[in-house]
Amino acid sequence: AGAKVQAYDPVAMKEAEHLLHGKASLKKDETAAAENADAIILVTEWPEFRLPDWDSIIKKMKGRVMFDGRNIYNNEEMKRLGFIYHGIGRETKD
């Protein structure tokens, strides 16, 4: 559908490179992966993702949509930061 994926994982980059065969652009850190992104999809719970540098990430992004597959972020805090937040598998209040 024309989506471009930029990915970062602090542990699995070698495996991702092998599995994705160039279908995603692998980045050096989470801020680089957010560059010009419309959305972030969190699918892992590594400690460094618990308290990211939101100011740096937001400055790099085009949009502000978050799909939190691990539900590690607070809905109200993400809204305060300007995100359209989706905690996957849990009900969110508008």
Image: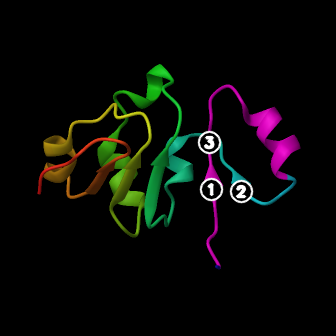
Q: Residue at x 62, y 29 (%)?
A: 10
Residue 60 % position (x, y): 42, 59
Residue 6 located within the stretch drawn in magenta: yes
Q: Are marks 2 and 1 in contact (CB under 8 Å)?
A: yes
**Residue at the disc numbered 2:** 25
* Residue type at numbered disc 3: Tyr
Q: Say above or below: 49 vs 61.
A: above
**Residue at the disc numbered 3:** 8
Q: CA distance from mark 2 to mark 1?
A: 5 Å
Residue 76 shown left or right of residue 24 in the figure:
left
Which comes before the other along the chain, label 2 or label 3?
Answer: 3
Q: CA distance from mark 2 to mark 3?
A: 9 Å
Q: Residues within 10 Å of mark 2 (few under 14, many from 20)?
A: some
* SS at circle 2: strand
Residue 57 % position (x, y): 39, 50
Q: Residue at x 36, y 42 (%)?
A: 89
**Outermost residue toward the bottom?**
1
Q: Which residues are magenta?
A: 2-20
**Residue at the disc numbered 1:** 6
Q: Are marks 3 and 1 in contact (CB under 8 Å)?
A: yes
Q: Quadrant of the N terminus?
A: bottom right
Residue 84 % position (x, y): 26, 60
